Amino acid sequence: MPAANSEGKGKENFYGRRKGRPLRAGRKQLMKNLLPALSVPMEAPDINPQSLFDSGTREIWVEIGFGNGEHLAWQAAHNPDVGLIGCEPFINGVSVLLSHVEEQALKNVRIHADDARPLLDRLPDASLTRAFVLFPDPWPKKRHAYRRFVGPENLDRLARVLAPGAILRVASDHPGYVVWALRHLQAHPSFDWLAERADDWRIRPDDWPPTRYEEKALAGVPVYLTYQRV
């Protein structure tokens, strides 16, 4: 998962895994044959996200760190008129999402198999209507907390590309990350927490399918945060 900032060192560093176990033959073929067709072209300094999808696409959503892609694939299947851009530098996860895309014949998925920040910086203002940051790396050690994605610089990025009224969903099962995310989101002037009662952050909404990571509940009880772009 990309860092929240670059510690003032100029070019932003990336922290996190890019590769895991060797890919099986079928997934290697998907990476070779299908990924190029779905990849977001990053050569230009500006990207029109609508141009990546069919003309009937009414909205563009982005998922930052999609893991194995279960959530992104579910959203794509249930919202065929929405274009979904998934960002994930871990190629094993990318290969799993490609399997979902092929098996379900999903036509509304595009992939940026790298750090999300360069992509966000190329998108136009107010070009997205929903963003997901679900169960990101919690970076639990205090000295690594600056690496967390939900922080001032990345919230500024999201505020710029999210249209007024757009939704930002953040989830974590790590208590320290939840406190961190709430502190920074509550302090940011562009985001308004939509929770009105405890169940709004304790219970996963019906249109928010679980991921494999979430079902393992590795660190604790999941918390679901829904914010709106002011």
Image: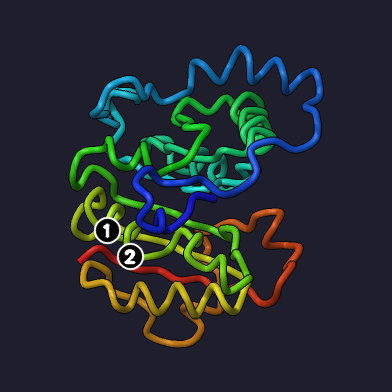
Q: Quadrant of the C terminus?
A: bottom left
Residue 229, image x, y percentages? 25, 63
Quarter assignment of residue 187:
bottom left
For residue 152, the mark is: 2
Residue 65, image x, y percentages? 53, 48
Task: Report the front residue among 95 and 17.
Answer: 17
Crowding at mark 2 (Cα within 10 Å: few <14, some 14-19, many 20+): some
Are discs 1 and 2 less than 8 Å apart at CB?
A: yes
Q: Which residue lies furthest to the top in this view?
A: 33
For residue 219, the mark is: none
Task: Identify the residue at image location x=41%, y=26%.
Answer: 40
Task: Identify the residue at image location x=43%, y=35%.
Answer: 80
Quarter assignment of residue 188:
bottom left
Q: In this view, does 62 lie to the left or right of 141?
A: left
Q: In this view, does 19 lie to the left or right of 195?
A: right
Residue 46, image x, y percentages? 23, 29
Give the amino acid type for the residue marked by disc 2 in the picture.
Pro
Give the amino acid type for the residue marked by disc 1 in the picture.
Asp
Crowding at mark 1 (Cα within 10 Å: few <14, some 14-19, many 20+): some
5 to 228, vertically: above or below = above
Residue 145, image x, y percentages? 52, 68
For residue 156, the mark is: 1
Task: Report the front residue among 87 and 200.
Answer: 87
Q: Is residue 206 left or right of residue 182?
A: right
